[in-house]
Image (spheres, coloured by chain):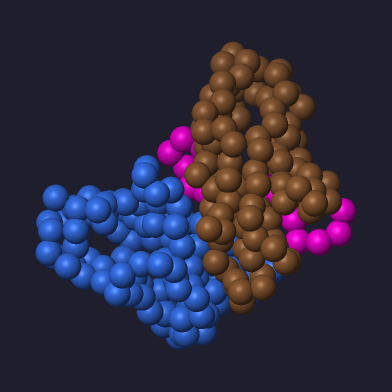
Chain colours: A brown, B blue
Amino acid sequence: AQSVSQHNHHVILSEAASLELGCNYSYGGTVNLFWYVQYPGQHLQLLLKYFSGDPLVKGIKGFEAEFIKSKFSFNLRKPSVQWSDTAEYFCAVIPMFSGGYNKLIFGAGTRLAVHP
Amino acid sequence: KAGVTQTPRYLIKTRGQQVTLSCSPISGHRSVSWYQQTPGQGLQFLFEYFSETQRNKGNFPGRFSGRQFSNSRSEMNVSTLELGDSALYLCASSLQGGEETQYFGPGTRLLVL
């Protein structure tokens, strides 16, 4: 079945550690890719997005993601995490071939806990 | 600009009842999408409206329905509530849909007893 997979459900890091969260999707054709974050008690916010062009995209708060088409991957990275990055992170895809419009397909999410 | 607003924020209903949730998009946004978030199933797409027309629909039973008004505000309705409908219902808006960012509201938390 077509889906979005996030490899880690829970990640625990110390402050200043590097972060990489994996995301793979199984849709062929053109896709729009997103990473959203949900801080405790807050609503979903966009971290970054990829539609076309440079496969390395930079988002807010020092996050970046790399689109590797051959691997159907869109991994999220941050070189040095802070306690305030504690949140749940969602990878999402819009498969454009199906007239996807705003049909975001989400991964299961990764809960990140950063310890001071 | 004010963000996406959803009312009510919390709701408790009993099985068999129906419920209507409301979403006001960001001013100027014409596309409104609805999602259901549960611990077991995660975030799932319900449907999307643009200019009062449903353009896309997820895999939910017919008990879940929605509509959009001429001012782009949207409502979703769930009839004959089941325990499994307990969830956070999120609304998101964007200008036109497609290659645009969706902005999410805070959600309505529905508890079905």
Residue B59: x percent and y percent? 40, 67
Q: In this picture, is B50 found above or below A93?
A: below
Q: What stretch of residues is rendered in magenta?
A: A36-54
The N terminus of chain B lies in quadrant: bottom right
What's the residue at 44%, 68% (across, down)?
A: B58
Residue B69: x percent and y percent? 41, 82
Magenta stretch encompasses residue B41:
no
Q: In this picture, is B92 found above or below A72?
A: below
Q: Nearer the viewer, residue A3 or B65?
A: A3
Magenta stretch encompasses residue A41:
yes
What's the residue at 58%, 51% (across, down)?
A: A4
Residue A36: x percent and y percent? 59, 47
Residue lying at the far right in this picture: please name it: A54
Residue lying at the far front in this picture: please name it: A1
Q: Is residue A87 visible?
A: no
What's the residue at 32%, 51% (across, down)?
A: B87
Q: Is residue B15 left or right of residue A109?
A: left
What's the residue at 55%, 66% (across, down)?
A: A103
Q: Is residue A72 visible?
A: yes
The count of marks equals 0
Residue B2: x percent and y percent? 53, 60
The image quadrant of residue A80 is top right
